[in-house]
């Protein structure tokens, strides 16, 4: 299914497209997190990313359950948005030699990913409720809450744990 092709006729089609979009996005995130973890110097940052990698694996399992409950085959659809966020993250990270500045960049890049996911899950949950797919709302909400918590954790790492301060000094 192409992006906004005529294949999307109904709200249900749009909902399913969005589910496939986040499914693809979660898989791309699973691939990119290990690189971010490798590049991170700050221990709190590396731990936060490592924990979120574990969570992301579970999120994909939950999405598999969502597809099953909806009698859909789990599959992704290209999501140029997440590809772009990851591509830009790799590009900036590749240009930074200073390890502490790199940590600040990794936090910022990871937060861009989390915000993307928060926005997508928020929409999908609202649409699931509207379309009467109550059986998948809890699973999707668990994922949304983990994305929010990951974003909050990254904020703490940047501000309270001193990643930004060290990068600026
Ligand atoms: Fe996720
Ligand atoms: Fe996430």
Image: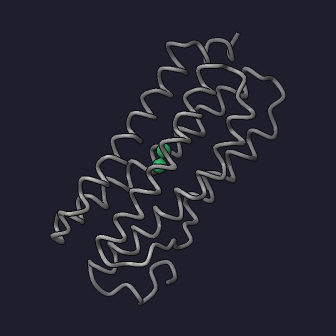
* Image-based side of 12 in relation to 91, left or right: left
Q: Which residue is found at the position 68% from the left and 35% from the top?
A: 37
Does 75 sit above or below residue 103? below
Does 101 sit above or below residue 63? above
Does 21 sit above or below residue 36? below
- The percent position of residue 90, horizontal first and vertical second, equals 73, 46
> What count of labels does the image hold?
0
- The percent position of residue 49, horizontal first and vertical second, equals 58, 34
Q: Which of the 4 image quarters holds residue 135?
A: bottom left
**38 and 94: which one is in front?**
38
* Image-based side of 7 in relation to 102, left or right: left
Q: Which residue is found at the position 53% from the left and 59% from the top?
A: 25
- The percent position of residue 162, horizontal first and vertical second, equals 58, 12
* Image-based side of 128 in relation to 93, left or right: left
Task: Give the residue at the far bottom of this rendering.
Answer: 6
Q: Which of the 4 image quarters holds residue 100?
A: top right
**110 and 5: which one is in front?**
110
Q: Which residue is found at the position 68% from the left and 38% from the top?
A: 36
């Amino acid at each position: 299914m192409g992006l906004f092709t005529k294949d999307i006729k109904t709200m249900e089609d749009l909902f399913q497209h969005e589910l496939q979009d986040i499914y693809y996005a979660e898989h791309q995130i699973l691939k990119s997190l290990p690189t971010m973890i490798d590049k991170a110097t700050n221990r709190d940052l590396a731990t936060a990313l490592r924990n979120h990698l574990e969570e992301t694996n579970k999120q994909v399992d939950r999405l598999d359950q969502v597809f099953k409950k909806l009698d859909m085959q789990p599959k992704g659809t290209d999501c140029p948005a997440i590809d772009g966020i990851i591509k830009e993250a790799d590009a900036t990270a590749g240009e930074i030699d200073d390890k502490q500045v790199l940590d600040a960049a990794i936090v910022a890049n990871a937060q861009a990913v989390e915000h993307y996911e928060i926005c997508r899950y928020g929409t999908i949950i609202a649409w699931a409720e509207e379309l009467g797919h109550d059986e998948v709302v809890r699973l999707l909400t668990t994922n949304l809450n983990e994305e929010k918590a990951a974003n909050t954790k990254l904020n703490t790492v940047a501000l309270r744990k001193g990643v930004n301060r060290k990068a600026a000094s």
